[in-house]
Amino acid sequence: MSTTKIVDHLGVTDGRVPPAVLAAGAWVAQSLVSRERGGRFARLAGTALGAASVALAGASVVDFARRRTTVDPRVPDASTLVTSGVNAVSRNPMYVGMVGVVVARAVARRSVAALAPAAALAYLLHSRQIAAEEEMLAAKFGAAYAEYVATVPRWVDGRSVGAVRALLEDRTG
């Protein structure tokens, strides 16, 4: 198969590789840079971080599905600006979850070298994918998106902690 056909098959658009393909590449890269396996505590910590990361990304996917808007970053036809739930914690909970799973695998392996593919994944998502998505969302949703950007972090920060507390209080209160 030619390189062009492979690129077309992977769904590369505008020089951007689909995030799931990037995450799979990071996973494979981890296997190449570290074959270590951590002890019981490292595996337990990695499993907990991985489960939390999958839950974060999954909750966002479910929220998008409920609102009948696309989760495919290659299709810039968002019908709704999703700002509640886990999207009040991070503007990109699916990407935080993807990177979190790759970090979790590095933790489970107790390997600093295995963090390099996670950092590369975060960098590529940040610089290539998210920038393009934010440009489209700003054009489509204008002031509502500008307000969202001003109040919710791109990844996670101190504001995220307050948002998680609010989510937990809503569910228990």
Image: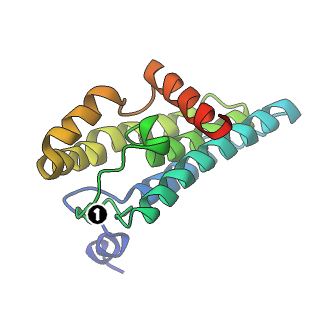
Which quarter of the picture shows residue 88? top left
Of the 4 image quadrants, the one containing the C terminus is top right
Residue 115, relative to residue 75: is it above or below?
A: above
- The residue drawn where x is 62% and y is 34% is 168
Looking at this rendering, what residue extends furthest in the front direction?
173
Q: Is residue 88 left or right of residue 100?
A: left
Find residue 105 and report its horizontal and vertical position in percent.
66, 42
Q: Is residue 138 left or right of residue 60?
A: left
Looking at this rendering, what residue extends furthest in the top direction?
158
Q: Nearer the viewer, residue 86 or 76?
A: 86
Find residue 22 and report its horizontal and vertical position in percent.
43, 53
- The residue drawn where x is 29% and y is 64% is 12
Find residue 51 and report its horizontal and vertical position in percent.
69, 46
Q: Is residue 131 left or right of residue 98?
A: left
Which quarter of the picture shows residue 149? top left
User: Can I make out residue 114 in this image?
Assistant: no
| Three-letter amino acid code of the residue under disc 1 | Arg
- The residue drawn where x is 76% and y is 33% is 45
Q: Nearer the viewer, residue 133 or 140?
A: 140
Tell me the SS state at disc 1: loop
User: Can I make out residue 58 in this image?
Assistant: yes
Of the 4 image quadrants, the one containing the N terminus is bottom left
Number of numbered discs? 1
- The residue drawn where x is 51% and y is 48% is 26
Which quarter of the picture shows residue 92? top left
Find residue 83 and report its horizontal and vertical position in percent.
37, 43
Q: Nearer the viewer, residue 130 or 153?
A: 153
Q: Is residue 172 left or right of residue 10?
A: right
Few, some or many residues within 10 Å of mark 1 (<14, 14–19, 20+): some
**Residue at mark 1:** 74
Looking at this rendering, what residue extends furthest in the bottom direction?
1
